[in-house]
Image (tube, rainbow, N blue to C red):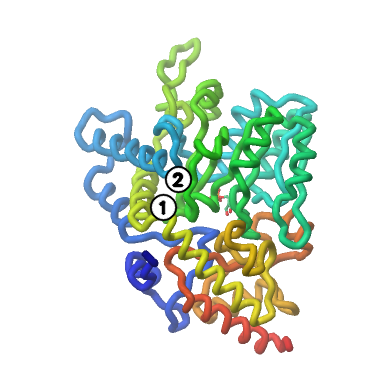
Amino acid sequence: MELDVSEVRKDFPILGTKRSGKRLVYLDSAATSQKPSSVIDAVGYYYRNYNANIHRGLYGIAEKATEAYTDSKRLVAKLINAESYRNIVYVRNTTEAINLVALSWANANIKKGDTILITQMEHHSNIVPWQLLAKRKGAKLDYVGLTKGNMLVDMDNYREKLGNNPRLVAFTHVSNVLGVINDAKLMSSLAHKSGAKVLVDGAQSVPHLSVDVKDIDCDFFAFSGHKMLGPAGIGVLYGKEELLEEMPPIFGGGDMIRSVSFDGSTWNELPWKFEAGTANVEGGIGLGAAVEYLNNVGIPRIREHEKKITRYALSKLAEEKVSVYGPGSVKDFESKKAGVLSFNIKGAHPHDVASIFDSEGICIRAGHHCAMPLVNKVIGEPAAARMSFYLYNDEEDVDRAVSTISKVRKILHIS
Ligand code: PLP
């Protein structure tokens, strides 16, 4: 059944507000998503009714908070088809999840001269932790190139680079600039054949696509709550149990220990071993509510809806003679592109474009999108404008954006 966007929007209080006297059009969900009332209410309800520290109190509301926090992990585990909540480590965001793997598993396993392989389409959060690690260890960081035009991962180049037997392959499931959807299952299986461990950055996939970590067979999978209707400050590292078991914790303190003596400590069981100190309880509870909301709507329905708007937007942008970076033709976007469209209007700086959009009550992103090597070197521009869609956007939002492009040209005297 198709999504009824006007009904969906009623669930998101901010989308009922106006900017510059016009209905707010939010086209920046790749940066962060808006939040439905059920998520806002779940967090408020927790604070009003059972706020307590978890894993500590022996009284009713503390037990209830502990149960709600663990239940949210059960929901997250089910969403990505993980074995159990034991595989779900809560962190602050995707960035922290990737850094945790870099500082723990990779720090223990990557040696001088080893290779870490990533792609040229990574977000800074899947580049910089590996640059830091490579520098510390004397390891090599290598990048898989992209195909010309469509900017997909060049699979020939990937196979060739796997021939160097990297210790770790880390790649994004969906690019936050190009919207490219990588074949994570194929990339993971090829990497495993070459003896590498695999980390997938799922920041842009979990909110929009059905994700099955068992089917992908990755070793680690990272994502952020705030991009999937949940609160900021809560993110997820999924890891295979045997790897999480062998990994040392990176933060020490309360809750992550089984015992502490003057001579040393032993670690708590999974996943708590990696969660030192008081948890982001409200974040976990809010994320659980977000997963429930996504389940009620249905991720496959959201994906179909986004395909429809993306198809519509691509054709409207083509009419306006604006081309998007990456797989942009209506023919090839279906399986390879999510609802993320980066573009430039010839003769206009993307920052000017974004501020003219803002004056029309439309939020888009402009800049390097935390992917400077991709934007500056591969695309070859200092910056780009980006529209990204979610379940609360529709064709009317696209029409508002497209008519603003004409306005940009008029204001900036671009013929
Ligand atoms: N990876 C990708 C592909 C992203 O789009 C983002 C955020 O935009 C991140 C990682 C980092 O996410 P966070 O800032 O929530 O850690």
Q: Nearer the viewer, residue 374 or 411?
A: 374
Above or below residue 19? Residue 28 is above
Tell whether label 2 touches label 1 (CB within 8 Å): yes
Report helix, strand or loop for mark 2.
loop
Position in image of residue 51 (x %, y %) = 27, 43
Q: Quadrant of the C terminus?
A: bottom right
- The quadrant of the picture occupied by the N terminus is bottom left
Q: Disc 2 residue type?
A: Ile
Residue 91 left/right relative to 166: left
Asked where in the image residue 277 lies, by quadrant, the reply is top left
Which residue is at the front of the view, 145 or 41?
Answer: 145
In the depicted structure, whether residue 343 falls above or below residue 250: below
Q: Report the residue that reaches farthest toward the top.
A: 263
Name the residue type under label 1: Gly
Secondary structure at numbered mark 1: loop
Q: CA distance from mark 1 to mark 2?
A: 8 Å
In this rendering, would 406 be left or right of 53? right
Q: Which residue is mark 1?
A: 230
Q: Which mark is residue 234?
A: 2
Q: How many marks?
A: 2
Front residue of this view, candidates 118 and 130: 118
- Decide if ligand 1 comes within 8 Å of the CB at mark 1: no
Res. 351 image quadrant: bottom right
